[in-house]
Image: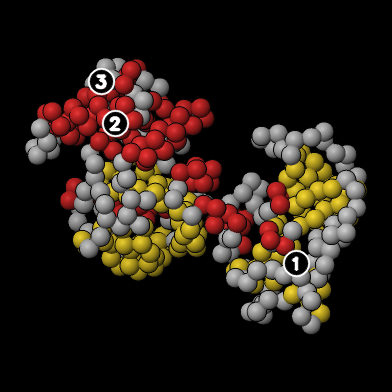
Amino acid sequence: MPDIRLSQVSRVFGAFKAVDDITTVFAEGTVTCLLGPSGCGKTTLMRMIAGLETPSHGSIKFGDRDVTHLPPGKRDVAMVFQYPVMYRTLSVIENIELPLRRDRALSPAEVRRRADEVLEVLQLSAERHRHIGDLDVGTRQKVAVGRAIARQCDVILFDEPTTNVEVHAKLALIRAFKDFRARLRQTVIYVTHDQTEAMTLADQIALMQSGRISQCAPPHVMYDRPESRFGGWFLGNPGMNFLSPRSREGSMLRFDVLSNAIAVPAGADGELSLGIRPEHVDVLAEPADDAVAARILRSSITIGGQQLLSLLVGEARLKAKIPPCEPPADGKTVFIRCRLEHVVLFNDGLRLPAPVTRAA
Ligand code: ATP
């Protein structure tokens, strides 16, 4: 399987840059999720990789093969869309076999073998003779995935395939996706605006903002060490807390949410802010040496039953996510602790690479 190499790729519509000078490599045999808010350029980038859109500038290579100006049919890519075109009066297996039969190089026995393989991997064997028109949207989408992977193209592109699928079928589809990944290692680009889906499926997430890739990294790296405040804010539900320093004295920085001053790291010459995820704010009922007092402004329950607390600490406000419990009373005083290993410092919106340490 080839890697996908983008070199200074841009796409301009009139005066608007939908994709802005992207240079990156999506490694062979991996799943890259293009993630980002609506309008950031995910679909445009994917369409250029597919050959459905031509870059205004730059080049796209699959391995050493320059595909920048090749039509989709000459690229060896398969695609799964939000609304796949399916033949409603044909059966599941006929829909999967149809594109394979057009390939003269494949014998009928090989066509059947591949179709059987994807039916098994996607747990669709029981549906093989059902008509597409009789299936629910989730199962139909599974068949679309099966049809794409059966072609065994070098590259498979998914454009928000679960958007129209109800939540339980969506989980089944994601499970099926992971199963086929375990068996067939094609290079996959998967467009989504759903961060949970990206965190679950991706080997790496390419987080996009305003036509650019702001960070490309494995999900846990993206989550724990966002390169920018944008990444800290976009990932997580809710995203990171950002706090301004209360004071800066020489080489010491103080924040309302930390009991001790921290050392000013190298490069901290711009506007500083501290980032901490709500689930990394420890909430204690009793005082502790390394904790500071906070007042609960409001508490609410998240999906999954956790408590989300809005807290006031000195003049700072922050959110804390704690395990399911009786809702604590608004106005109550608690004590919070933010461990330095979970804290990141941003300088003019970009993360400072040095670990955050206590001031000497
Ligand atoms: P969404 O998640 O909403 O689909 P996206 O990240 O996939 O968003 P794109 O569809 O790539 O974003 O669009 C990026 C920007 O480019 C948007 O502002 C869109 O309006 C614009 N755009 C896309 N295609 C065209 C086009 N053919 N003509 C003009 N503008 C376009």
Residue name at image x 68 percent, y 53 percent: 277
Query: Which residue sits furthest bottom?
Result: 250
Which numbered disc covers residue 118? 2
Which residue occupies 28% across, 38% down? 149
In depth, the one of 117 and 209 nearer the eye is 117
**Residue 64 seen from this side:** yes
- What is the secondary structure assignment of the residue under circle 3? loop
Q: CA distance from mark 2 to mark 3?
A: 15 Å
Of the numbered discs 1 and 3, the one sitting upstream in the chain is 3
Q: Determine which quarter of the picture holds residue 97.
A: top left
Residue 306 horizontal side relative to residue 83, left or right: right
Residue at position x 80%, y 55% in the image: 337
Specify the quadrant that holds the C terminus. bottom right
Residue highlighted by disc 3 = 91
- At label 2, counting other C-alpha atoms closer than 10 Å, the crowd grade (few under 14, some 14-19, many 20 or more) is many
Q: Amino acid at mark 1?
A: Ser
Q: Say which residue label 1 marks.
A: 244
| x and y percentages locating residue 214 in the rendered image | 50, 63
Horizontally, residue 219 falls left or right of residue 32, namely: right
